[in-house]
Image (tube, rainbow, N blue to C red):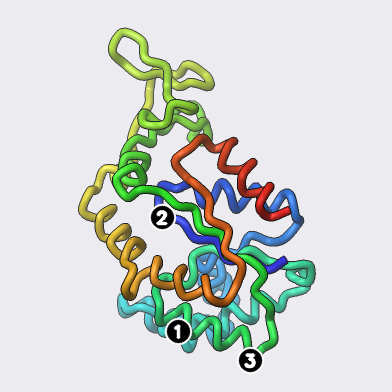
Amino acid sequence: MNILIFGPNGSGKGTQGAVVQKKYGVPHIETGVIFRQNIFKKTPLGEKAKAFIDRGELVPDDITIPMILDRLKGDDCKKGWLLDGFPRNLAQAEALWTALEKERIKLDYVIEIDLDREIAKKRIMGRRLCKTDNNHPNNIFIDAIKPIEKDGKFTCRVCGCAELTARADDQDTAAIDKRHGIYYDTKTGTLAAVNYFKKRAKIISIDGSVGVKEVSEDLLKKLA
């Protein structure tokens, strides 16, 4: 089962990707990890990518896509894969589709976690970190994981720690708006890429506004 997964920052895409990985035993492949591995191993493509990164430039698709294809051909991908983080725009979607067809790699599903832009922004800004354990889920805008409010202050819903903090980048509205501006762009951005694949693969659209458990249940039901 070969899958692309899409969702705006704040949609829980990483969480749902892990659910699919566990259920179907396919690797959850993130493009950022592919870059780091190629650069660390000093592969020819990794060396080319590093040169662009060191200059603060975007890595061209003719370097990125061969890296991705090489990863999709790995032994652990024989039963399928879940690709996360690419394509980010329409041009990349067209280039990836052409490359997949050339390599005769089938794309079975495209998962789209649908979430209103303002809700996605609130979820990012609502994330809180527990001093005891950063993996304790707390978000002041999500009822299912909302921290406990005591004397006008929030405490961790898991361990009761009274020291909850927010990451600086989670409060950077300009950065959030910039990322979301690319994602929600239906002409050339990520949603344009999603629409491109709607004519070429089976699309599974999931309502990301409900709870994490409900999203997982809906996703696995539609993948079955």
Q: Earlier in the sequence, mark 2 or mark 1?
A: 2
Q: Position of residue 41 (x, y in %)?
A: 60, 76
> Please, what is the three-letter code of the amino acid marked with disc 2?
Pro
Residues at circles 3 and 2 in contact by the CB criterion of under 8 Å: no
Give the answer, above or below, for where 165 lies relative to 159: below
Give SS at disc 2.
loop
Toward the viewer: 209 or 9? 209
Q: Secondary structure at mark 1?
A: helix
Which image quarter is the N terminus in? bottom right
> Which residue occupies 68% across, 78% down?
106
Question: Local crowd at mark 2 within 10 Å, few (<14), some, or many (≥20)?
Answer: many
Is 40 in front, or is 160?
160
Residue that mark 3 sits on? 102
Residue matched to label 1: 61
119 to 184, vertically: above or below: above
Give the distance between the C-alpha atoms of the residues marked 1 and 3, in whole angstroms: 16 Å
Q: Quadrant of residue 164?
A: top left
Residue 15 image position (x, y, % from top left) = 56, 46
Q: The residue under label 1 is which amino acid type?
A: Asp
Instruction: Tell me which residue sits at (66%, 52%) in the image.
Output: 222
Q: Is residue 105 left or right of residue 67?
A: right
Q: How far is mark 2 from mark 1, CA to CA?
A: 21 Å
Q: Residue furthest top?
A: 151
The mark nearer the N terminus, 1 or 3, is: 1
The answer to whether residue 68 is seen in the rendering is: yes
- The residue at which mark 2 appears reads as 8
Q: Nearer the viewer, mark 1 or mark 3?
A: 3
